[in-house]
Image: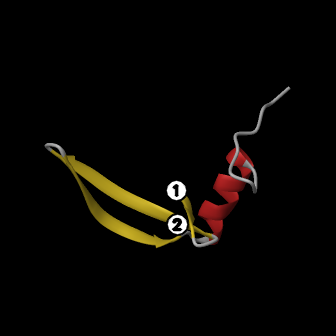
Amino acid sequence: MGELGGRLVVLVHTQRGDATCIISLRKANEREIRWFEERLGEDGRPRHHA
């Protein structure tokens, strides 16, 4: 998961030798956005639990 053009996206890839092959790139769904924000926050930085 990561941000592309201000939108959260999901990238699926595989390694084939020295090459990285992209299988899929799509907009994240609501559940994935929630998961991302719960773990990393809206700014994409890891949350530290006290």
Q: Pointer 1: residues within 10 angstroms few (<14), some, or many (20+)?
A: some
Tell me residue 45's x, y (percent).
70, 44
Question: Which residue corresponds to mark 2?
Answer: 9
1 and 2 marks in contact (CB < 8 Å): yes
Give the colour scheme shown: secondary structure
Q: Name the residue type under label 2.
A: Val
The image quadrant of residue 39 is top right
Residue 1, label in figure: 1
Q: Pointer 2: residues within 10 angstroms few (<14), some, or many (20+)?
A: some
The image quadrant of residue 21 is bottom left
Residue at coordinates 42% horizontally, 61% vertically from top-left?
11
Left or right position of 20 against 42: left
Residue at coordinates 86% horizontally, 26% vertically from top-left?
50
Disc 1 element: loop
Left or right position of 45 against 11: right
Residue at coordinates 75% horizontally, 50% vertically from top-left?
41
Q: Name the residue type under label 1.
A: Met
Tell me residue 49's x, y (percent).
80, 30
Outermost residue on the right side: it is 50
